[in-house]
Image (tube, rainbow, N blue to C red):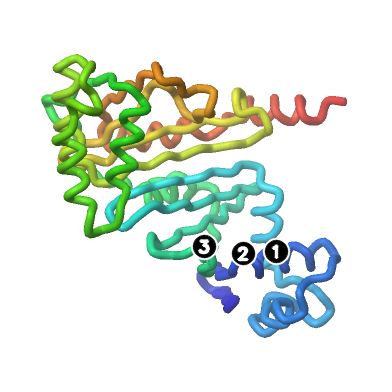
Amino acid sequence: MARLDAVRHRIELTDHEFEALRLVNNGEEADASTRQALEDAGMVGPEGQISPLVLDLVQTVSEPMIECAIETAGPQGPLHAVLAVREETVWYTDPWPQDGPDSPVLYSRDELPQLLWILARLVGLRRHEVPRAAVPFTVPLRSIDAVVQTMSLSEGEWEPARTVATAQLDRFFGEVAESDRLMLMATLSHLESTARVTMVWGPDVSTDARGVALWNCGEGGYWVRSTPAEPLTAQDITPDTLATFRPLSAGEVWRALADLLPSSAELRALVERVGAP
């Protein structure tokens, strides 16, 4: 059921209800029962006028200046949160791992200066230092994906899968240098979650997007995949693609998230390019 929290600037909607709001905003016909539910929740008036807070959500998500996808995975399963920026307004989702595809989505509104704090919370950033023994390592990207997919199971299977993945390094990484295998084994043994953050502000992924892929290894620190760089496309991955991971402190993760944001020069260049005839 659609819900509106005007004090905390929160709105809960199903995808179907959000689509109905978009249609109402465009002056189009929406499903009658859904529209009635939106009216009952105080989001839409009898003449089709959308309440200011709800209208702000619809406009920000439909026509964002910046979009961000935050994908995480851990013992309770995968999560996909989204964030949209329009002028000084930020709307974002904060789902639960157990939410199904038809679950209501909770949208929260905040202001642009809070954006980094929101990203840090959505990826689960906590204070961790780099272990003294941590050094970068390089392994085949496809093998890494296979291991992480094996580990991204239900809560009851997370620990056994991690044990199996670590025990089967010979099968997954038989041709990897011994020093890299040892560092990978130590890293996987502490792996608590993975995160992938992709920031997009235009149509060209080569110039209008940046991303970062992280591992949270708890006491083993944070690790970023420095190569191949995000955002990855299918064409970037071949059987020979190698992935290099390097350790980061929590402060360095914060700076990596900050570096995803487009500069004013990049935004001006986008406006000039998109606005050109």
Residue situated in front as seen by the camera: 220 or 258: 220
Q: Which residue is mark 3?
A: 101
Q: Mark 3 is on which residue type? A: Pro
- Whole-number angstrom distance, CA of label 2 to CA of label 3: 9 Å
Q: Which residue is mark 1?
A: 19
Residue 65 pos. (x, y %): 66, 42
The quadrant holding residue 181 is top left
Residue 259 pos. (x, y %): 46, 30
- Whole-number angstrom distance, CA of label 1 to CA of label 3: 15 Å
Q: Secondary structure at mark 3?
A: loop
What residue lies at 29% left-to-right and 57% top-to-bottom?
Answer: 154
Up-down relation of residue 194 to residue 137 (above or below) = below
Chain-order first, disc 2 or disc 3? 2
The quadrant holding residue 31 is bottom right
Q: Which residue is mark 2?
A: 15
Please identify, in this view, whether the residue under mark 1 or under mark 3 is nearer the observer.
3
Residue situated in front as seen by the camera: 150 or 242: 150
Give the residue at the far front of this rendering.
171
What residue lies at 45% left-to-right and 59% top-to-bottom?
Answer: 94
Callout 2 touching callout 1 (CB < 8 Å)? yes
Image quarter hosting the C terminus: top right
